[in-house]
Amino acid sequence: MLRIPYGVTGAELHRDISGAEILESQIGTLKAEDSEDELVRKAMAAPIGSPRLSELARGKKTATIIVSDHTRPVPSKHILPFMLAELREGNPDIDITLLIATGFHRATTREELAAKVGEELASREKFVCHDSRDASSNVEIGVLPSGARLVIDRLAAETDLLVAEGFIEPHFFAGFSGGRKSVLPGVCDQVTVLGNHCSKFIDSPYARTGILEGNPLHTDMVAAAKLAKLQYIVNVVIDEDKKVAAAFAGDPFQAHEAGCSFLKGYCRVKPQQKGDIVVTSNGGAPLDQNVYQSVKGLTAAEAAAAPGAVLIISSRCNDGVGGDSFYKALHECDTLEHLMERILATPMDQTDPDQWEYQILCRMMLKHRIIFVSEPSMQKTLEDMKLEYAPDLDTALERAYAEKGPDAHLVIIPNGISVIVEP
């Protein structure tokens, strides 16, 4: 028996899988000897490609720290105190604003902020939530390599010193999170965020997990961070318990690159043979709460799949679909081919919210048969979206082998969001 992540309980696979390839990241072996605070302190004491933060603060009147929002598992309470202390060590009179990088998400609540940074910090410091939909709080500062307008939060544009915290993990179309993403999409206006997620960029073969070079989203993100004059970052890699396992501080691009290289060593996997059937998950709760989020895990299966494969994802989807426009796009289209034609014909400045997610799912559906192992209550919804439902992993595999034959090569990726599948 093999247990695959599913909600909080997991899902059991009873079928004989003796001939299967199992691809797992080594992130579970990542355990730091130092405490979380000590890892951050040491990284900031020896910044990569940059003076110390205290030196950067000298002579500045204002500083803005871009802070991750409630949707990101960044252990901010172990990062921000050190950043604040160093800024004030270099300049006791500096006026510091902490700008919450909500990107295109809703505002972080006071309760969520306190849970993330600690009540003492939440009460003492000046926190402001970025609002991508409020044109009056954002200002245009330049043009990106793609030709898109760069419109960012005034608090980021007009500060004397812009710095950021964040964390690095594999990202299914930006390559990796962290670094430059604090600016774009973190503190950008909706016109810039949606433009960066346009169909042309998402369609690029380089807009994939673990790929930065040639990735058009990354290219514009880097340009945005440079135009915004982001000068310093503290980024961390977290372990399976969401604790700091490594920290990287300094120049926004050199420190981020070092962190990505470090993480890649733990997450990189390569199938000996592409799978005719690929089984994966979205990492269990809370990451498999809806269909929208589950697209991330499916992209790992896609990367390990032979042409025309059957992709099976274990995802509880207890919160349903995860977006009305995401659901409607797949439910209301007459064919997937017509949906993809419409997506690819959409201009950059008319990108629809959630478009990138249903574009990626549609891409996979056009190439592969996709089966969701999910809650019985999800069957009709999944079928409305032209996806297939199965009550358990064994049933899904039975169907897959019925199509692909008894000698089909099976690849199992227990946690699809923790790996970088190499070709």
Image (tube, rainbow, N blue to C red):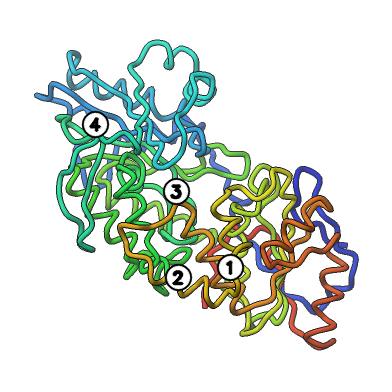
Q: Which residue is under mark 4?
A: 136
Q: Real-space Cα distance between discs 1 and 3?
A: 36 Å
**Could you say which is closer to the camera, residue 218 or residue 291?**
291
- As helix, strand or loop, the secondary structure at mark 2 comes to helix
Residue 106 in percent (x, y) is at 47, 34
In which quadrant will I find the N terminus?
Answer: bottom right
Mark 2 neighbour class, 10 Å CA radius: few under 14, some 14 to 19, many 20 or more: few
Amino acid type for the residue under numbered disc 1: Cys
- As helix, strand or loop, the secondary structure at mark 4 comes to helix
Mark 1 neighbour class, 10 Å CA radius: few under 14, some 14 to 19, many 20 or more: some
Mark 4 neighbour class, 10 Å CA radius: few under 14, some 14 to 19, many 20 or more: few
Amino acid type for the residue under numbered disc 4: Ser
* In the image, residue 161 above or below residue 199: above
Which-is-in-front pick, marks 1 and 4?
A: 1
Q: Real-space Cα distance between discs 2 and 4?
A: 32 Å
- Answer whether labels 2 and 1 touch (C-beta < 8 Å): yes
Q: Which residue is under mark 3?
A: 168
Q: Real-space Cα distance between discs 3 and 2?
A: 33 Å
Q: Which residue is under mark 2?
A: 342
